[in-house]
Image: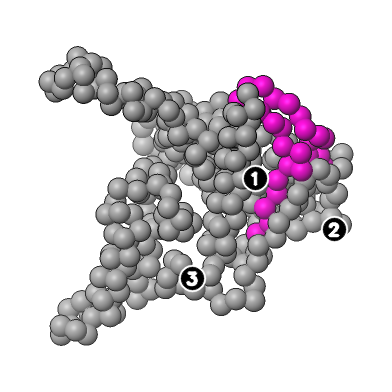
Amino acid sequence: MTEHLLAAGYAVVFLTRRGSKFPFWRRLEPTDPYASLLGLMGPEGHSTWAATASAVGAEAAAATSNGARLLAVPFTSVIEYLAFLRVCTKALHEPPSRYLPNDSNANGESAAATTAAKTSAEVSVGARALVVLAAAVSDFYIPEAAMATDKLQSTSGGASNGLSLQLHSVPKLLRTLALEWCPLATVCTFKLETNEHVLLAKATASLAAYGVSVVAANNLADYKKRVTLVQAEHPVLGQHEGNAKPSGPAPAVLADRIVGDETALVPVAHVTTRVISVENSKRETGDCYGRSIEGELVQALVAIHRDNLDASASREMAN
């Protein structure tokens, strides 16, 4: 998705787990490393991998303005991820001048120059931000306070007893993110299920519980070919500006509870849905601009973001 967001003109802050797929570079990861190595060592002009690397490098440079529009923030643990997510999203809501040095600084910059920079940077990214939480990093973790400080001994508790771990649920921070850390941003979260009968209900519950702008709902069986975008039918006007005014009934799941093994569609109310499908189209893998579920999804999210920007501008003019 990062490649498509860059192609759409966005600057992207990319939180990425070390060792996971990376934009552009993902297309250079060989399925047969030995064959790729032989290609690099072969006669000049016979290395397919090297030619591909050169082409992908040029494409990446063009898409990112030589890196200026892509900032990668790597993490290893879920604790790091949550910390970086908080810092990055809060920065979207705070004026950039907060991160500029004071007028009197160690670098000898003039007070006039620093003040001028602050004056031009008093407006936060705000509603111009699109936050896409494309994957759950983890549902469970071990809090730092509960981690062992020394090596776990293989004989602890008796060799025949094995090892038992007690995992804790990762804190649910989506509502805090959407309403406090970056309250003006368009926020998209994802919901993945294995039972299509509960998928829409789960997405609707996320809308109601977390106050996000849109939920991209996937079924594991066909998540690379189909996604459903779920939004509130009656958005809460001014929700993120602190003066919430319901424009109609809130999204609702019309069932007492969801077990997960339902065999009939769980009914919902007061949501709108849009199905994006590429089932009848050959997936393009060599070019990020080819038709793919990620490309179609980004186009739809960009349209939602623009609608939210227009609505935000209209409210500002009305006030």
Per the model, the C-alpha gap separating discs 2 and 3 is: 36 Å
Name the N-terminal-most of marks 2 and 1: 1
Q: Position of residue 8 (x, y in %)?
A: 46, 56
Question: Residue 172: in sight, yes or no?
Answer: no
Q: Could you tell me which secondary element the residue under label 2 belongs to?
A: loop
Instruction: Check residue 100 for magenta coloring.
Output: no
Q: Quadrant of the C terminus?
A: top right
Relative to 81, is 189 on the left or the right? Answer: right
Query: Disc 3, disc 1: CB below 8 Å?
Result: no
- Dot 1 crowding, Cα within 10 Å, few <14, some 14–19, many 20+: many
Q: Position of residue 226 (x, y in %)?
A: 65, 64
- The residue at the far front in this view is 317
Q: Position of residue 238 (x, y in %)?
A: 66, 28
Q: Nearer the viewer, residue 127 or 202?
A: 127
- Dot 2 crowding, Cα within 10 Å, few <14, some 14–19, many 20+: few
Q: Residue at the spot x=33%, y=23% of the render?
A: 119
- The dot on residue 290 is 3
Which of discs 2 and 1 lies nearer the camera? The answer is 1
Q: Which residues are magenta?
A: 227-253
The amino acid sitting under disc 2 is: Thr
Name the N-terminal-most of marks 2 and 3: 2
The amino acid sitting under disc 3 is: Gly
- Dot 3 crowding, Cα within 10 Å, few <14, some 14–19, many 20+: some
Per the model, the C-alpha gap separating discs 2 and 1 is: 26 Å
- The dot on residue 124 is none
Taking 91 as reference, is 106 above or below it? Answer: above
Taking 102 as reference, is 286 above or below it? Answer: below
Name the N-terminal-most of marks 3 and 1: 1
- The dot on residue 214 is 1
- Residue that mark 2 sits on: 263
